[in-house]
Amino acid sequence: MSFPNHRSGAPGCSGTCCLQVQNLGLTLQDQVILRNINFHLHCGEIVALIGPNGAGKTSLFHSILGHMSHSGEIRFEPAGGRPTRPLIGYVPQSPQFDSGDPISVLDFFTAAISRWPVFLPIRKRHRDRVLACLHRVQGEALIDKRLGTLSGGELQRVLLALALEPLPQILILDEPLSGVDVEGEYQLLSMLQEIRTRYDLSILFSTHDFSTLPQYADRVILLQQEILKMGPPREVLSSKEFHAAFHLQAPQEGGWSP
Amino acid sequence: MTLWYRLVDLLPFAWASPGSMFFMKNALLAILIIAPLFGLLSTLVVENRMSFFSDALGHSAFTGVAIGTLAGLSESTWCAVLFAIAFALLFTYVRQKSSMNTDTIIGVFSSAAMALGIFLSTLGGQSFSKFNALLIGDILSVEPAKIGLLALILVVILLLWLSSFNTLLLSSVHPTLADSRGIRTFWETALFTSAIAVVVTISMTWIGLLVINSLLVLPGALARNLSRNMAQYHLVSVLSALVCGIAGLISSYYLGTSAGATMTLYLALLFFASLLLRPKGR
C-alpha cells in the first residue's frame, strides 16, 4: 500500500500527518500508570522513549495500539486526509526462543501474513513474498534459519520486516536494542534511519541505550508516569530531570557522558 | 468395513486370515486413525509446553467418567468429554487471569480432578476395580461405530489445523505479537485445549489413561529433535506415531501385552534414537 509523500514534519506541528496524543491517562487497579501525556509524532520523525523500568513505556505503546482502554485522546491525521486510525507496525519485546524450536523464519512469517497453513510445505509464491519482506531489512539469508538460532539483532530484523508488512504509517518498537550486540545495534539503527526516509513513516521506540540517541533520534521523550522532559536528545540527556529519573549524579559540564 | 476386512486379508499375518479375528482388524484400523490424530496434536502440545497439562486433562476425563457412572449414565464417555472441556476452558482462563506459575496451576487442577474422580468412584464403598480397564485401556475392544466416530474427529481436527494452525502457532510462540496482529489468543488457546480434551477423552478407553499422555508428547518431542521447519516437524511426528502405533499393536498381539503401553515403548525408543541422531548444536 502507499500514501502521499510529503515533507518531514517541521518543528512544531504542521497539522498534517501527525499522531496527536492529548491528555492521555491510564489507571490499572487504582494505580496510576500514565497521566497527562501530551505529545505529537510527526511524519518521518524518529522519537525515542526513555524512562526507568516500570515507567509506563510499554503501557503507552499499548494505549497507542488500542490494546488498552485509556482516558484522553489519540488522533491521527494523515497527509491531506481526514483523521483516521493509523496503520501501526509493532515490534514487541521478544521472548527467548528455544534453540530446538523447529520453526523457520519462513514458517513464522508465512503464519503471520498469509492464510496458508504452515504445517504443509510452503509454496514458492509465499516464499517469494517473504523474501521480498525480508529484503527490506537485508535479511533474505535468514529465511530458512530457525527462530531459535537467530542472534538478537537478526531476530529484531525479522520482527521489523514483519511489522513493515503491510507497510504502516507509524512504526513502534519496544526495546529493539535489548539483547543486541554493538554491531547489530548500529545496523538496526541505520536501518531505521533508512526506513523512515524511504517510506516516510514515523518511528517511536523505547530504549535503555542512551549513547546512540544523539546520532539516531530526532527527539527524546523522558517518561515516568508523565512526560518529565521532551526535546532534542542532547537537551534531554543533560537535563536535571534525566539525572533524577535514573539516579545519576548531577550533570557535569558538557552534559551527559556514558 | 467389508472393504477394510478384504484389504487386511491380504496381510501376511496369522490373524489377518479371512473371516476371523475381527477385533484385531478393527484395532488396526482404529490405530491408523488415532496415530495421525495424536501425531498432529502432539506438535503443538510440545511447542506449547503443554505435556503436563495434557496429562492433567486425562485425569479430568477420568473424573468425568466417574461422575457419569455415578449418575447412572450408560455412556459415561460424553459426560467425560463435557467435563474435560470444562476443565480445559477453566484452566485456560485461570492461566490467563492469574499471575501464578502455569506449572503450579496444572498441579493444583490435576490433583484436584484426580482426587474428585477417586472420591466419586469409591463413594459408598464401591470397588475401584471396575475402572481398571480405563487405566490400562484395550484397543481390541474398539467397535466399528467407534472407529467411525474417531474418523469424524480426525476430520474435524484436520479442518481445525487447516483453518487455524497459523494463529494457533503464533499464539503459542509469540503471544504479544499475535495479540498485536489482532489474533484473539485466549480463544485460540481455548479451542486447542478443548480439542485435546475431546481427543484424549474419546480415545482413553482404548489407549489407557496411564499412557495416553505419552502419545501426545513423544511424537512431537522426537520430531522436534530432527526437524528444521514446521512441515518436517509434522511429517516426522505423524509418521512416527503411525509406525509405532502399528508396530505396537502387532507386537502386543504376539506378546500378549497392552497395546497402548507397547506403542509407547516403541515411541520412547524412537525418541532416544532421535536424541542420538539429532544434528549438532540442538
Image: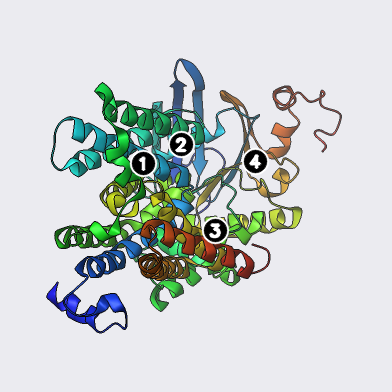
Q: Residue B177 or A220: which is nearer the viewer?
A: B177
Amino acid type at circle 1 is Leu
Query: From this viewpoint, is residue B78 visible?
Result: yes
Q: Earlier in the sequence, mark 3 or mark 4?
A: 3
Do marks 3 and 2 both belong to one polypeptide chain? yes
Q: Quadrant of the C terminus of chain B?
A: bottom right
Do marks 2 and 4 both belong to one polypeptide chain? yes
Instruction: Give the label, 3 or 2, closer to the camera.
Output: 3
Give me the disc on residue A78.
none
Do marks 4 and 1 both belong to one polypeptide chain? no
Q: How many marks?
A: 4
- What residue is disc 4 on? A207
Eyeballing the image, is B221 above or below B20? Answer: above
Give me the disc on residue A62.
2
View extreme (top): residue: A30
Q: CA distance from mark 1 to mark 2?
A: 34 Å
Give me the disc on residue B57.
1
Q: Quadrant of the N terminus of chain B?
A: bottom left
Q: Earlier in the sequence, mark 3 or mark 2?
A: 2
Do marks 3 and 4 both belong to one polypeptide chain? yes
Q: Chain of mark 4?
A: A
- What residue is disc 3 on? A101
What is the secondary structure assignment of the residue under circle 3?
loop
| Residue at x 68% of width, y 38% of height | A208
What is the secondary structure assignment of the residue under circle 4?
loop
What is the secondary structure assignment of the residue under circle 2?
helix
